[in-house]
Image: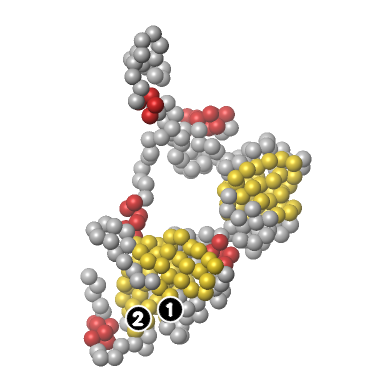
Amino acid sequence: MKTLPPDLATHVAGRITTLATCWIVTRADGVRLGFTDHDRALSVEGVECQPQNGLSPSAMNDGPEFAAGGGDVSGTLESTALLKTDLEAGLWDNADVRVFLVNWQTPSEHVLLRRARIGEVGRAGAVFRAELRGLAHLLESRQGRVFARICDADLGDSRCKVDLTNSAYQATATVTTAQREWLRVTGLETYANGWFSRGRVTVLTGPLSVFASEVANHRQEGAVSVLSLFQPAPELLAPGTEVVVRAGCSKDLETCRTKFANHLNYQGFPHMPGSDFALSYPNRNTGLNDGSARVE
């Protein structure tokens, strides 16, 4: 149950109200932006909430007990606060959203209605739609380790411990030509074909310096390397743009041993019996299922 500040409670209890809704969004890069459905800017908690985008929220719903509620909000890309390149580069993914009820005549009279996270973001022309997920959805995320054959660590994290500053695993390249789905770069000619497949490319310079994507495939064509992207770039990268490319990992023990010499830190369970073995039964004279150790 929400407790309204005394001044706002008095205003809400009156016969005429001047109420508006404000959203304050904090993106993963730390940028804080404010929006409102009022017709002029309102200052809430030191953030200027702008009306230009005409945000239109759907009805928010809350599930029973710990079920994740949600809703969505839509608007138009009409200001510098909302750029299509930022949406497509993923800067708004999982951003924190706080929704306020505000007395627009006296913006200091406001109350926090709810908090949410931005889920899927879609765009059609100049119109965008963002899914709002209640914080209870965080309870559905995977916690702890997973008992599986493949490694569940991220390459270079504190569990993996591969040193990505090593030039064998990370390199800077320069774009020669590009489409949204692939890049042709120089600077990777000393690496084997496929070395950066399943890796990651991050743009360092130019207007898309915040963009990053997984590498679907890496192949060498003489002195030029071709990187196919899982996530298309929001727009074409200009020739001369610098990118940093990280080696790929297929998450299996053999790759961990031969490519990174890191098998002692492998975070998977490669000798875990599969379902076919678990459901099998002893047969005579096969030499299998005799009770001996599976791994010595």
Q: Amino acid at mark 2?
A: Val
The residue drawn where x is 55% and y is 38% is: 249
Q: Is residue 81 visible?
A: no
Q: Secondary structure at mark 2?
A: strand
The residue drawn where x is 34% and y is 60% is: 135
* x then y, percent, for residue 126: 56, 72
Q: Quadrant of the N terminus?
A: bottom left
Of the numbered discs in the image, which one, if any, rests on residue 36? 1
Cβ atoms at labels 1 and 2 below 8 Å apart: yes
Q: Is residue 192 left or right of residue 142?
A: right
Q: State the residue in front, 239 or 274.
A: 274
Crowd class of label 2 (few under 14; some 14 to 19; many from 20; radius 10 Å): many
Q: Is residue 123 visible?
A: yes
Q: CA distance from mark 1 to mark 2?
A: 10 Å
Q: Which image quarter: residue 61?
A: bottom left
* x then y, percent, for residue 260: 56, 33
Q: Is residue 73 left or right of residue 249?
A: left
* x then y, percent, for residue 223: 77, 42
Among the two numbered marks 1 and 2 on one chain, the one whose residue lies closer to the N terminus: 1
Q: Which image quarter: residue 2?
A: bottom left
Of the numbered discs in the image, which one, if any, rests on residue 177? none
Q: State the residue in front, 25 or 270.
A: 270
Q: Is residue 65 left or right of residue 141?
A: left
Q: State the residue in front, 31 or 237.
A: 237
As drawn, 69 above or below 15: above
The residue drawn where x is 34% and y is 69% is: 60
Residue bearing the label numbered 2: 102
Q: Amino acid at mark 1?
A: Thr
* x then y, percent, for residue 197: 61, 41
Q: Residue placed farthest to the top in the image?
A: 285
